[in-house]
Amino acid sequence: MKKILEGNIRIIDRVNGWREGVKEAGAILLEKSKIEERYIDAAINNIERLGNYIILTDGVAMPHARPEDGAIETSVSLLIVKEGVEFSDEEEKVKLIFMLASKDNTSHIDVIRKLSNLIDDEEMIEKISNASAEIEILNFL
Amino acid sequence: MVKILTVCGNGIGSSLMCAMKIEEICQEEGINASVSSCDFNSVTGKDVDLVVTIKELADQITTIKTAPIRSYTNKKKIKEDVLEAIKGLVK
């Protein structure tokens, strides 16, 4: 997980709504040419169309689209929003946004397994939420 | 064999995470299950015994028995939400 997230973590205080949160998380991958710009739009569109299936558990979201929506390399970024951002009135505010890109339907399975085990670890999520620098987080992983 | 399908918006992220957790739960409980995942639009016509997804999507699935979950990754919550339904399907 450390290798996957290295250089892909950004910490900010606030975003103006969930769309901006998804855009910021996507921008990390866009800058590294892991995705095309349209991938971010597709991820936003999925949330608008099908709701909050990307909220994996309280406080953690994983926006994503399909490989054919402009994923270049299988990759994950992490945007930490210190103040949290609301995705819907029914859900708790999201502090961690993991943007997932997968270049095909199978190459991300190992990443998904690692990420899901990480997210299932409540203590770890708490530590990541409170971190103030990427290096601090990489040391936990 | 119980056939379980996990569902999310596009079938390759959240639902896959959940499928992995349900496989683990079934193994621990000694339940013989086959777990697959797919996107919301592909649910119709799937030959499965139980669909597992968030309430928002479960409410829109009327043709197959559903078990709504509160989280795709929190194994403890998933277990609380689906185990009874799965056990009910074991013949």
Image (cartoon, rainbow, N blue to C red):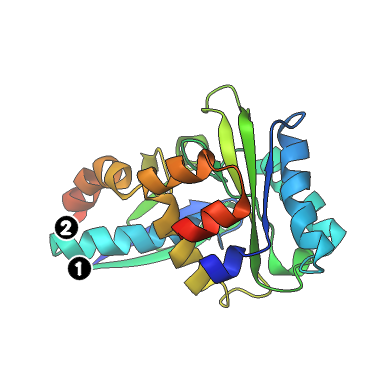
Circles 1 and 2, Cβ within 8 Å, touching? The answer is: yes
Q: Which amino acid does label 2 sit on?
A: Val
B1 is higher (above) or lower (below) than B40: below
Of all residues, the one furthest to the top in this rendering is A89
Residue shown at 59% from the left, 50% from the top: A62
User: Badge 1 is on which residue?
Assistant: B32
> Mark 2 Cα within 10 Å, few/some/many (few <14, many 20+)?
few
In terms of depth relative to the viewer, which is nearer, B49 or A63? A63
Q: Which residue is rendered at x = 53% and y = 66% of the image? A: A2
Image location (x, y in percent) of residue A8: 68, 59
Residue type at the position of mark 1: Asn
In what quadrant of the picture does the N terminus of chain B appear? Answer: bottom left
Closer to us: A120 or B78: A120
Report, in whole angstroms, how far the alpha carbon at label 1 lies from the one at label 2. Answer: 8 Å
Question: Residue at coordinates 56% horizontally, 60% vertically from top-left?
Answer: B11
Looking at the rendered structure, the secondary structure element under dot 2 is loop
Residue A115: % across, % down: 48, 60
Does residue A110 sit above or below A29 in this rendering? below
For disc 2, the marked residue is: B90
Determine if marks 1 and 2 fall on one subunit: yes
Chain for numbered disc 1: B
Sequence order check, earlier mark of 1 and 2: 1
Q: Quadrant of the C terminus of chain B?
A: bottom left
